[in-house]
Image: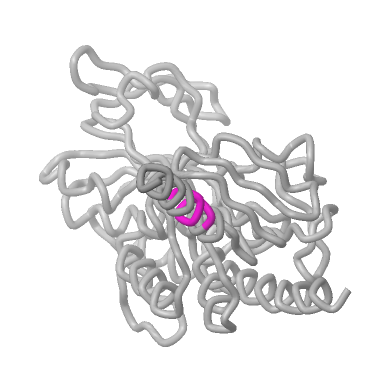
Amino acid sequence: MTIWRNKIMAINLHNKIKKNIMEENIYDVIILGAGPAGLTAGIYLSRAKIKTLIIDEGMPGGQIILSHEIANYPGQDNISGFMLANNMKMQAEKFGCKILRNTEILDFDIKSKIKTIETKKGKFTAKAIIIATGGKSRPLGIPGENKFKGRGVSYCATCDGDFYQDKHIIVVGGGNSALEEAVSLTKYAKVTVVHQFNNFQAYKHAIEEAKNNNKIDFIMESELQEIKGDQTLESVIIKNMRTNKISEKKIDGVFVFIGYIPSTDKFKDILNLSERNEIITNENLETNIDGVYAAGDNRAKKVRQITTAVSDGTIAANNIIEFLNNVSST
């Protein structure tokens, strides 16, 4: 009798533990992506006592952790992208938001009433989803780029700038990121900016700051055609787009800032996407699937800044709160 009693107690304990684990994996909202949009939504939802999980395939912060200096975020005179992201992360966790980092999504079902996200760390369910997966740096797509990626070719000034102390590097691009990072990189190296047009697509102050820096040269109306070297990066082939003249320039490193690619591949057959593969939403940030919202740089919109991502996270969170209240009342 004692043996059977022990077996029953063991089975009951196992079932209780299994039930607790299952209940722990049930959320009101799951946010995919821990950039500024996802973290802001996590702050608002958790503060409203809504059980919220954020899943990110990398590190919390998204693209902003690559920014050496942020000087236009309201209330912050000067802060690094890493520190701003870390502050957002700690604030979300303080309100009870759970964050899973470096967690690959293996499978998902966002069409059903109860959404399911499957990872190596478990299967999680929620009544609503926010897709805030952001984007990734756009590559040049030229010979030699992949060969020297991480050892001569970089997409992050903060990560790799100090490797080029007293070297000569090229920055590719003509937008705000390219010019701001070019200025930042002059702390370490001599910089040549290569841009395909004869004018920049950046704010006036960013252009003036770069042009007034005596450690920056400019090669306009030109594109990189190839990155060359043996064991290390040695030179680049540059084509003038107006004259078609080809030249070779000795260089120690290449930093690429030519825009982003939205991280929406997983959803291309499920959600309505724009021609640029950005998620299409209405003004409430709702997608074409009930209970699925999108926020941040993966959403179809004109302006992409940290503040607009934060705005998206705020709007999505508040509309989800209303959505959950309506679901509960039906």
The correct choice, above or below, for 232 with respect to 70 in the image is above
Give left or right: position of 298 versus 64: right
- Residue 175 visible? The answer is no
The correct choice, above or below, for 224 with respect to 94 in the image is above
Foreground residue, 319 or 255?
319
Q: Find residue 295 and report its horizontal and vertical position in percent.
A: 65, 62
Q: Find residue 140 and report its horizontal and vertical position in percent.
A: 48, 30
- Residue 40 visible? The answer is yes
Question: Which residue is painted at 54% across and 40% down in the image?
Answer: 105
Q: Find residue 237 and report its horizontal and vertical position in percent.
A: 38, 21
Provide the residue span drawn in magenta: 14-19
Query: Is residue 18 covered in magenta?
Result: yes
Q: Residue furthest front?
A: 1
Foreground residue, 209 or 142?
142
Question: Which residue is painted at 26% across and 39% down in the image?
Answer: 169
Foreground residue, 220 or 188?
188
Question: Which residue is painted at 33% across and 28% down in the image?
Answer: 149
Q: Residue furthest top?
A: 230
Q: Residue furthest right?
A: 330
Q: Quadrant of the C terminus?
A: bottom right
How would you classify the magenta stretch by its main secondary structure? helix
Q: Find residue 327 and report its horizontal and vertical position in percent.
A: 82, 71
Quadrant position of residue 38: bottom right
Q: Residue furthest bottom?
A: 75
Q: How is the image coloured?
A: one colour
Query: Is residue 206 covered in magenta?
Result: no
Foreground residue, 234 or 318?
318
Give left or right: position of 134 versus 90: right
Question: Which residue is painted at 39% across and 24% down in the image?
Answer: 145
